[in-house]
Each structure stands twice: as C-alpha cells, then as structure tokens.
Image (spheres, rainbow, N blue to C red):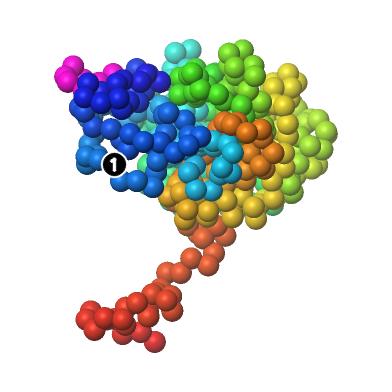
Amino acid sequence: MREIDTPARNDRLIVAPGKPFPDRTIPQVPFGTSERSPGTSPLVRNPSMTPHPSRTTNGRGRLYDSIVDTIGDTPCIRLNRIAPSHVRVYVKAEYFNPAASVKDRLAISIIEEAERRGDLKPGQTVVEATSGNTGIGLAMVCAAKGYPLVVTMADSFSIERRRLMRFLGAKVVLTPRAAKGYGMYQKAKELAEANGWFLARQFETPDNAMVHENTTARELLADFDGERLDYWVTGYGTGGTMTGVSRVLRRERPQTKIILSEPTIAPLLGSGVPQVRNADHSPAVSHSAFTPHPIQGWTPDFVPYVLQESVDQRYYDELIAVAPPDAMAWSRRLAAEEGIFTGVSGGATVAVAMQVAARAPEGSVLCAMLPDTGERYLSTPLFEGVATEMTEDEIALMRSTPGYQLETA
C-alpha cells in the first residue's frame, strides 16, 4: 500500500497498488478522524467518530473492458468490535470479487491458462464439479467469454447456488448427496469423456494455486507492507488459496505463522490418513475421516491434490479444527456487530482466528480469509431463526405510532 499525505493536513489516504489516483489534485478529505485511539495503528481511524468533512470517493481512474478484469484486489478490513483489544484482526473480504467469492480467481485462471495452452477451444463446453462458488465463478467467466458451462453438484448444497449458476447461463446437473463430493466429481469426468468437453479439474490443476500465488498473496504483501502480519488464517476447499499464498509467505514473510483449519466432524488432515489417488492425481475413494458438514465449500470428502503440496511441505504451522455451530455463530456476529456479511466458511475462519487471537502476544496482527458472501446461505441453517414476518418487538414498534399499520394476526 502507498500512503499519501494530503496537502492541508497530516491525514493519509490509502491507495491500492496498481490503482493510482487520476492525474488531478488529491482531495483534502480524510476517511476518518485525524485523532486515533491509544494503541491503534496510525493507519486506523477511530471507528466510533464521524468523519469530517463528509466522505467522498475519487473513482478508480480507469475503465474496464470486461467483468473479468475486476477480479482480485479485495480489501483487508479491520474488526473493530468483536476482536480482543490486545491484537488487531483483519479479514480479507473475497466477496468483493465480481461474482462474490474467492473462486472467481480460480475460475479466470483455469479458463485463461487453458486458452493459452490451447487446451480449451473456442465455443467448447466447460464442465466442472463444484459445491457452488467455483461454479458461480466459472459461470460468470464463461458468460463473459462465450463458453457453455455444465456444472455437477450434489443436491445437498444450497438452492441459491444452483439458481445463481443457471441465472448466469450454466446448466446444473445434480448428483445424489449420498455420493458426496466424490460422486459429483466422477459425474463431471463421465460427462467430459462422453462429450469431449473441457474438464476444469479445480482440485488438481496447477492453475489453481498459481493464481493465488500471483494475486492473493501479492495483495497481502502489499496491504501489510510496513506492518506486522503475525498470523494468516484460512480453511481449505480445493487448497488453492492455502497452497498459493503459503508459497509466497514462506518466502517473503517467513515470520508469519500460517494457521489452517478444517471441520471437527471432517478432520481429513487431522486424521493422518493419506488420500488414495488415481494416476491423474484425482481421488480414488472418499476419505474415511469425512462426515457431512454444513461449512459449504470447505473440506470435500477427499484431500485435493492442490492441497497436498501444503501437507507435504508442511506449509502450515498449526491445524485447528472448528465446530460448525461455532462457524455459524461467528458469521452471525460478523454481520450483526461488524456489518460484514459473509458465509459459514468465513465464520469458520474467523472462529479459528479468534482462538489464535485470544492467546496471541500483545500487539499481534492477524488476517483471516472470508471466502464468500452470506447471500449464498439464505436457505441454509445459517439463517434459521431469522424471521420473514415482523417479530413481536417489531409489531410493538409499529403500534407505537398511530399511522400506517399493517393488520396483523
């Protein structure tokens, strides 16, 4: 990150790498107060105080040729109300990607690298097995580039995901939930072989970790340039974020501790049982330690080959399991207390980050990954108890003034 002092006062604006201001005078408007609370970073404003003067924006200073050019450069945001006071906790909000998840990065990498190699022909159908986010990212990319897309997905995943993919032009083939992730993966392979389609192979392709090495990791280095980054926390789905970012952190920020997580009820790595693979590195069987869990997008019923590098090279310093109810509780807290709307996987990552933060030394800085948006989960247990009709308290508020009252039962 670059810091720019405004001419009239010693307030700094933060400018993302590769996103310079347009060639005009930098506005003399701070994004917060010039005072800061004791013990906070000089880059952090007091969130409880209203900015003066009014907030403005400047535009990005560029025009975009395609929606795919907006992928990446997602922000790291401080948690101001729910984190322990002796540390700073940030979240990297991947729902700022155009199709609202970290898997947009994977999707564009798979398609563009296949185009470069000549593996993907113009107009050829793309097929992939997905829990939803990769499929949504691929649907967005394929729509922008003119490729038909077929997605295979177990029928246990949220309704929103299949509707979003279909809305983006993809066809969604459902597989029995009893066959788990392995079943939807095998269905995608069958369809690719039977029809001559391009199989995206998100769980094995080197294009997966590479894009995180080239983008996600570089963004973290830039955003924490000159700052501490003591812990980086993530879970795994394909393993691409974990492996790609870890390559860079181990090389450029070796002091940063890497924390990996998986569900308590699906401890694939924690079990120590190796994954049985076929010659093409795809899973040969479902992993014996897997049981179904509600952290959609995390931990399929096999150890992806993309993740295997992180296991073999021992990129992570600690493996911490998280209970699904804790993941949901922290997702709800992020929304209600920080205004940060993320899904169950984001809640799971923050749950683990809070465990680490509680025992971290004074002044430590942590960053946790938020893979997607909470809007993918409206029909899932994450939203159980969220009323669609007015609650008793809301009815009482309605009746507290005389006008514009609905008739209620």
Q: Main secondary structure of the magenta part?
A: loop
The residue shown at (58%, 13%) is: 252
The answer to which of 192 and 395 lies nearer the viewer is: 395
Say which quadrant the N terminus sits in: top left
Q: Amino acid at mark 1?
A: Pro
Locate residue 116, reporting x and y percent: 44, 13
The answer to which of 319 and 311 lies nearer the viewer is: 319
Q: Which residues are magenta?
A: 19-26
Locate residue 118, reporting x and y percent: 46, 14
The answer to which quarter of the image holds residue 321 is top right
Residue 158 visible from this viewpoint: no
Q: Decide: is 218 above or below 93.
A: above
Say which quadrant the C terminus sits in: bottom left
Residue 343 visible from this viewpoint: yes
Question: At numbered mark 1, what does the secondary structure look like: helix, strand or loop?
Answer: loop
Q: Is residue 392 magenta?
A: no
Task: Decide: few, some or many residues near mark 1? Use Cα within 10 Å; few <14, some 14-19, many ≥20.
Answer: some
Locate residue 256, reporting x and y percent: 63, 23
Q: Which residue is mark 1?
A: 51
Q: Decide: is 102 above or below 224.
A: below
The residue shown at (42%, 47%) is: 164
* Circle count: 1
Instruction: Give the residue at the far bottom of this rendering.
Output: 409
Locate residue 128, reporting x and y percent: 54, 34
The residue shown at (30%, 25%) is: 10
